[in-house]
Image (spheres, rainbow, N blue to C red):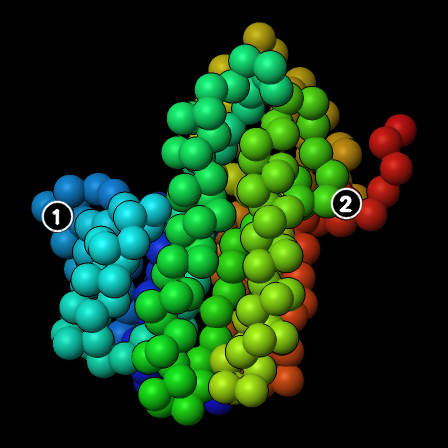
Amino acid sequence: MTSQVSTAVVIGGSQGIGYAIARDLAKAGHRVAILGTRGHAAGDSIAAGLGTGHIYLQCDVADEAQVEAIFDEIADRLGPTAVLINNAGVGSSADVAALEQSDWDSFFGVDLKGSWLTAKFAVPQMRGIGGGCIVNISSIHATLTRAGMFPYAAAKAGILGLTRSLALDLAVDQVRVNAVSPGYIRTPPIENLYNSQPDPAAAWARLEEVHPLGRIGTPEEVAAVVAFLASPAASFVTGATWNVDGGLSIRFAN
């Protein structure tokens, strides 16, 4: 089990859910490395917002050489990785007959392959310190979805399979692996989507109505679950998927 003061790496941590996770881990005493695709000027400002002792590194998680170099640099600057949060992802909708193979490969490179590559280079560091934990951010699209979302749903289902397999394979190393599946969360892409509807008020009302809790979630609510799974309080939790969706995935459409 990892100590509270250790190095945590948050992939895709520069905004929304990822930044909320990074902020919670920093508050818990972790030294946080945020990995993203923004330039260094913007990234350094984001890391500074967490306080002192945290860093931002630019990285394409689909590029094995970059990922390997980045994890070596993190170990040199902050110490070996004890907590890995895989939050990188891009939304995708497509027609199955129209999607180009190159687009498929590019999308899966970030949304699925990247989670394997970061684990590939983080796990040896975790083994070296006697254990660690990985939290993979999936989506309720992994188990239920909408028309046209097949690349995204496939990738997020793959994340759950990866989580189960890694949890089983790495238990002997005291590395816990869990997944969190958010539903509708108030992030900039969701706000932009619903505010651009012909009748935004009606669209928001309908979205909130279908949730048993009567509202959508916030990045902070997802981050709180992730922070728990990354903490010693979750020391006997591995291979699990935690839905953070306001009950959306438990009800019939009506």
Q: How far from the left and from the top, in percent, is residue 105?
A: 43, 34
For the C terminus, the quadrant is top right
Residue 220 in the image: above or below residue 235: above
205 vs 36, left or right, is right
In this view of the protein, which residue sits in the foreground, 60 or 248? 60
- Residue at 56%, 42% (x, y): give it: 155
Pointer 2 residue: 249
Q: Residues within 10 Å of mark 1 (few under 14, many from 20)?
A: few
Q: Picture quarter containing residue 249?
A: top right
Q: Of helix, strand and loop, which one carries label 1?
A: helix
Mark linked to residue 216: none
- Residue at 75%, 33% (x, y): give it: 209
- Residue at 14%, 54% (x, y): give it: 44
Q: How far from the left and from the top, in percent, is residue 13?
A: 34, 53
What's the amino acid at mark 2? Ser
Pointer 1 residue: 40
What's the amino acid at mark 1? His
